[in-house]
C-alpha cells in the first residue's frame, strides 16, 4: 500500500511538472522575448540616456506592458511611474590659475553643486596627485565620492581618459558643499585660484514599478528588477571608439535584456496567479549614472520585509560556461543561490558563483543598496566581464544576443524562484556588517 501511494505521488509530481513546463513554454517564448527586446533596443530609443526623450519613450513602453499584464501600481500611485528629482550642475564659466598660469579649461574637469565657487590655496581644499602608474579608477573614485574639497593633479600619462571623465554627468541626489577639480598635465600647485559659476537645476526622472499582491503574505516582498537606461548617442565609455556608421549605444544586453526579462516575468507570474508573497517588478533609471533609481526605490520599502531581490543584468549572451547557465553575484553571502539550484533539480540549467570577484560586481549593480541593508539581493548575469566585446559600445545591438538562450535563462529564473514566491523558502539574510 505504501509503495502504491508513493508511486501515485511520484506520478502526480511528474504530471504537475509537465503541466508547469507546458505552461511556461507557452508564456515565456522567444517570440515574446524578441518583441520586447527589439522595442527597447531599437534605434528610435536613442540609447535610452537619462534625461532624454529616448528614456521617456522607453518608460512609456514599459508602463504600457505593465498595464497590459494587469499589474497594480506601487502603493496606490496613480500610474506605474515612481518619480523623484535630482540636482544637476552645469558649468557656466570657470577660471583656474595655478602658480600664475591660467589653465586651459579643456584640461580641467570640475564637480561642484554650488552656484558660485571661489577658492585659493588658503581655502579648505587639499591638493593631491594621481601619479603615473597609479590605479586611476581607484584614485578617481576615492576623490570623486568624497565629501571634502580636492584639487587633484593628474599626470599627463592619463590624458587619454580625460574625455571619459568629462563625459560624467554632474548630477546627484544629495548635493554637497564641496568642490572637486581634476586638472590634467600639471605636476605642482603651490599657489592657485579657482573661480567657478554653475547653473544648478532640479530634474525629474522615474523608475517604472508594478505590483502583483501576495495572497497570504502580502507584506512580504520579492523583487524582480533591471535597469532601462543606457548611454545614449555618441557616449564613449571605457575608451570605446565611435563606429563610423553608428553612434547609438543601443544597450541591447545592458540592460534592455534585464528589463525585457522583468516584463516577461510579470506576465508569467500574473498568469500563474498563485504567488503567496507580493511580487514587485521594477525597471530602474539612472543606473549608468550611479544607481540613483535603485537607491531611491530602496528607501520606499522596509528592508526587513523584502525577502529576496532578483536583479537581472546583461543576460543576453552566453556565460563562460556556455548555454543554460548564469552566475549570481555575492553567491556566498546568502543561501539564495542554493535554493534556486535546488528548484532546478532535473533540469539542464546551472547557476554558478560570480567568476569575476575582482570586479566587485556585487557592489556595482542595482542590488547593492538593498544588500547593504541585509536583503538577500543578488544580480543574475551571464556577461563575460573579462571579455565581453560589446560592453558599453555602440555594437551592443539585438543581433549580438542569443535570444533562444536568453529565453531559457528567463524560464530558469521563473522556475527557480517559485519556492520563494510561494513562501516555502526564505533565503538567509546578507550579513551587512561584513559588507564594505
Image: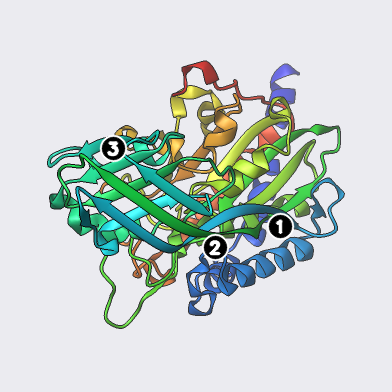
Nearer the observer, disc 1 or disc 2? 2
In this rendering, is residue 245 above or below 88?
below
Q: CA distance from mark 1 to mark 2?
A: 26 Å
SS assignment at label 1: helix
Question: In this view of the protein, which residue sits in the foreground, 323 or 354?
Answer: 354
SS assignment at label 3: helix
Where, quadrant-wise, is the C terminus in this rendering?
top left
Q: Residue furthest bottom?
A: 245
Question: In this view of the protein, which residue sits in the foreground, 161 or 64?
Answer: 161
Q: Position of residue 98 (x, y in %)?
A: 23, 49
Q: Earlier in the sequence, mark 3 or mark 1?
A: 3
Q: What mark, if any, has residue 224 been given in the picture?
A: none
- Find disc 3 in the rendering and name its residue: 139
User: Where, by quadrant of the figure, is residue 124 drawn?
Assistant: top left
| Badge 2: residue crowd in 10 Å (few <14, some 14–19, many ≥20) | many
Q: Position of residue 374 (x, y in %)?
A: 59, 24
Q: What mark, if any, has residue 267 been given in the picture?
A: 1
Q: Is residue 109 left or right of residue 70?
A: left
Question: In this view of the protein, which residue sits in the foreground, 408 or 205?
Answer: 205
Amino acid at each position: 500500500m505504501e509503495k502504491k501511494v508513493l508511486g501515485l505521488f511520484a506520478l502526480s509530481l511528474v504530471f504537475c511538472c509537465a503541466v508547469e513546463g507546458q505552461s511556461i513554454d507557452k508564456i515565456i517564448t522567444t517570440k515574446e522575448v524578441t518583441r520586447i527586446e527589439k522595442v527597447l533596443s531599437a534605434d528610435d530609443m536613442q540609447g535610452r540616456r537619462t534625461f532624454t526623450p529616448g528614456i521617456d519613450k522607453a518608460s512609456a513602453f514599459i508602463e504600457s506592458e505593465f498595464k497590459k499584464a494587469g499589474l497594480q501600481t506601487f502603493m496606490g500611485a496613480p500610474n506605474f511611474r515612481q518619480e523623484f528629482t535630482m540636482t544637476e550642475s552645469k558649468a557656466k564659466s570657470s577660471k583656474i590659475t595655478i602658480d600664475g598660469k591660467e589653465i586651459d579649461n579643456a584640461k580641467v574637469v570640475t564637480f561642484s553643486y554650488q552656484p558660485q565657487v571661489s577658492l585659493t590655496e588658503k581655502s579648505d581644499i587639499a591638493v593631491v596627485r594621481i601619479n603615473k602608474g597609479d590605479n586611476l579608477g581607484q584614485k578617481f573614485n576615492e576623490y570623486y565620492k568624497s565629501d571634502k574639497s580636492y584639487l587633484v593633479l593628474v599626470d599627463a600619462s592619463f590624458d587619454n581618459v580625460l574625455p571619459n571623465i568629462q563625459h560624467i554627468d554632474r548630477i546627484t541626489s544629495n548635493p554637497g558643499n564641496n568642490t572637486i577639480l581634476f586638472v590634467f598635465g600639471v605636476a605642482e600647485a603651490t599657489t592657485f585660484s579657482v573661480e567657478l559659476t554653475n547653473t544648478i537645476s532640479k530634474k525629474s526622472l522615474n523608475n517604472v514599478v508594478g505590483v502583483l499582491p501576495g495572497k497570504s503574505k502580502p507584506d512580504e516582498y520579492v523583487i524582480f528588477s533591471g535597469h532601462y537606461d543606457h548611454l545614449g548617442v555618441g557616449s564613449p565609455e571605457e575608451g570605446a571608439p565611435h563606429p563610423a556608421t553608428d553612434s547609438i549605444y543601443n544597450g541591447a544586453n545592458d540592460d534592455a535584456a534585464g528589463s525585457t526579462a522583468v516584463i516577461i516575468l510579470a506576465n508569467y507570474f500574473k498568469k500563474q496567479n498563485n504567488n503567496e508573497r507580493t511580487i514587485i517588478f521594477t525597471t530602474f533609471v539612472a543606473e549608468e549614472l550611479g544607481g540613483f533609481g535603485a537607491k531611491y526605490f530602496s528607501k520606499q520599502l522596509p528592508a526587513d520585509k523584502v525577502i529576496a531581490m532578483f536583479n537581472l543584468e546583461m543576460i543576453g549572451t552566453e556565460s563562460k560556461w556556455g548555454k543554460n547557465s548564469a552566475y549570481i553575484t555575492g553567491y556566498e553571502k546568502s543561501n539564495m543561490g542554493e535554493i534556486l539550484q535546488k528548484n532546478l533539480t532535473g533540469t539542464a540549467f546551472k547557476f554558478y558563483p560570480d567568476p569575476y570577484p575582482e570586479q566587485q560586481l556585487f557592489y556595482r549593480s542595482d542590488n547593492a543598496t538593498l544588500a547593504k541593508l541585509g536583503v538577500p539581493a543578488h544580480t543574475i548575469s551571464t556577461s563575460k566581464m573579462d571579455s565581453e566585446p560589446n560592453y558599453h559600445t555602440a555594437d551592443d545591438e539585438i543581433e549580438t544576443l542569443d535570444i533562444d538562450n536568453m529565453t531559457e535563462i528567463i524560464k530558469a529564473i521563473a522556475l527557480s524562484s517559485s519556492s520563494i514566491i510561494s513562501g516555502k523558502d526564505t533565503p538567509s539574510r546578507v550579513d551587512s556588517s561584513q559588507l564594505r
